[in-house]
Amino acid sequence: MQIQLGDISHIIQLAIAPVFLLTGVGTNLMVLTNRLARIIDRARVLEDRIHKAGRADPFDSEEINVLYRRGHLINRAITLSTLCALLVCLVIAALFIGDAFDLNLGGFIGSLFVLAMLSLIGSLFFFMREIFIATRTLTLRRVHPPLP
């Protein structure tokens, strides 16, 4: 069986929508990893401050605890976004394989897509929880500013 140029262009047309989704998920991963990097940087600053002082200021200790919680949430969001990207890649590959070899992979492709969407929803849920915690921390710092 030989694949014709017209078949290839049809397969590429089928894969366009998942490729755009993959671009969006990649952008989401970039945002999440940047947030995780900022959380880690802030936690290191606070840990150094506590280590140099020889004791933990209550506000610093509380902030580190919040940063650890935020880091775990972002880590879960990153994991689910990465899973989503992998599933979308499998969708694209299955589209090519199914169309190239005239296989009926509709159910499989649909299942992969639903799993990808559930992973993306989970990722966005954890991201939203992390944002709520970060915003609440800002509010608490405004009401109770750290000691000089």
Image (cartoon, rainbow, N blue to C red):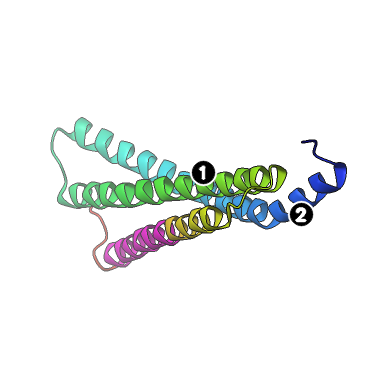
Q: Which residues are magenta?
A: 121-142
Q: Amino acid at mark 2?
A: Gln
Residue 53 image-quadrant placement = top left
Residue for point 64% across, 47% down: 98
Above or below: residue 45 compared with residue 91: above
Q: Amino acid at mark 1?
A: Leu
- Reading the image, the residue beneath label 2 is 13
Kind of element beneath mark 2: helix
* Residue with the mark numbered 1: 86
Principal secondary structure, stretch drawn in magenta: helix
Q: Is residue 148 visible?
A: no
Q: Position of residue 69 (x, y in %)?
A: 26, 51
Q: Is 21 colored magenta in this rendering?
A: no
Q: Nearer the viewer, mark 1 or mark 2?
A: 2
Q: Residue at x 45, y 46 (%)?
A: 83
> Residue 102 got which mark?
none
Around disc 1, counting alpha carbons within 10 Å, would you say few (fewer than 14), some (14 to 19), or many (20 or more)? some
Q: From the viewer's perspective, is residue 16 above or below residue 136?
A: above
Point 31% across, 61% down: residue: 133
Residue 138 belongs to magenta span: yes
Quarter of the N terminus within the rendering: top right
